[in-house]
Image: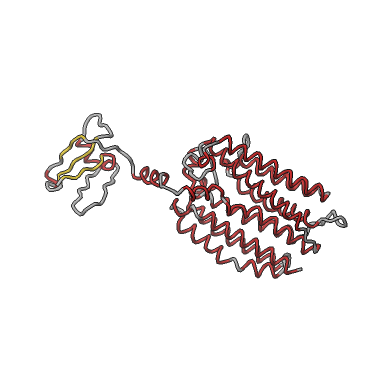
Amino acid sequence: MMKLVSLCDISNGFVPKTSSTDLFVKPKRIRKLLRGDISTRLSLVFDLNAKRRRIKLRVGPVFCKTYEEDSAKSYQEEEIPKAKLIWRAIKLPIYSVALVPLTVGASAAYLETGLVQVRRYVTLMLSSVLIITWLNLSNDVYDFDTGADKNKKESVVNVVGSRAGTFAAAITSLVLGVSGLVWTSWTASNIRAILLLASAILCGYVYQCPPFRLSYQGLGEPLCFAAFGPFATTAFYLLLGSSSEMRHLPLSSRVLSSSLLVGFTTSLILFCSHFHQVEGDLAVGKFSPLVRLGTEKGAFVVRWAIRLLYSMLLLFGLTKILPVTCILLSFLTLPVGNLVSSYVEKHHKENEKIFMAKYYCVRLHALFGAALSLGLVIAR
């Protein structure tokens, strides 16, 4: 019985376990047997019946690869249905990051003033969605330019097949979104709101756009926290609480604490989105927090981030900064927080599974934001 084994596998100490009669030859013995310049396309043929009595060598067309390369290639070349790729490229669940700051800001404004401005809310919602569209499209364009998305099939550039078209759509979304935000701020006569929103958009720009690209330095999470938390949530509160009678709405501790919680859960989404991209990011010099820490320490960070989130919530409740309704309703999302923590801890080394971690974070973000908003409304 003859068994064909790759020379590269033998020299690295790997032999597939196909049967109990497979013969394992240590790398040192192979080096003693083979002399001179040996091509990586050599293969070994072992006479298993002879076992230790003799070893036969012959040239064969076996291409040398490591098991790690094969595993990575099989993951990258896994066939994904077109519809699923389009769904991933659209990133529809991610748009909750546009709705949560707006809804929490609107709820805080209702708690303080009793105002409900539906038309202004809808305008801000559409503008926010356009801004997030710009962030997603431009991020795919710039990651395509650096090669970070070379093997990312769900990248919009790869799905559409046009870098220029994707970039044009991104700029169009930015212009329309900014126009809506400026118009709303102008009609509300609130200069503080437009300055806060401009700061939020600036965070998005320096996060991903050249020449800054601060996300490549691992600064994406702080920028995300500031943009969607204190900047955006507070700005929406000012716009939706302003009226002809009250144009200078005061900033309360309730609004500021709510904005901190929103920014925290938003940053957690971004952090968990890096788990399955560590190798690709490292290859192009993108030093995300997961590249610097590794996935094991990253899972540890996620676990303590969830604990910190609910500790902050409890602190705001005990100090009566937030209404008790916010605390009780938000704590109902604790099982989802535990799901995020346990899932990341269990699958942080499995690219094909850890991909879903960011979507569990989106679920936590949306539910936590809805609970926080409802608590503010009920407290009225």
Q: Is residue 9 left or right of residue 57?
A: right
Horizontal and vertical percent position of residue 348: 47, 54
Farthest top residue in view: 37
Q: How many marks?
A: 0
**Picture coordinates of residue 160, whole percent (x, y):** 53, 40
Q: Which colour scheme appears in the figure?
A: secondary structure
Q: Is residue 137 left or right of residue 230?
A: left
User: Observer-nearest residue: 356 or 244?
Assistant: 244
Q: Position of residue 131 (x, y in %)?
A: 66, 46
Pick whichever, 71 or 76, lies toward us: 76
Examine the image and state in which quarter residue 211 appears. Answer: top right
The x, y position of residue 267, in whole percent, is 61, 52
Residue at image x 16%, y 45%?
2
Residue in front for this viewpoint, 377 or 18: 377
366, 36: nearer the viewer: 366
Classify the position of the C terminus by image quarter.
bottom right
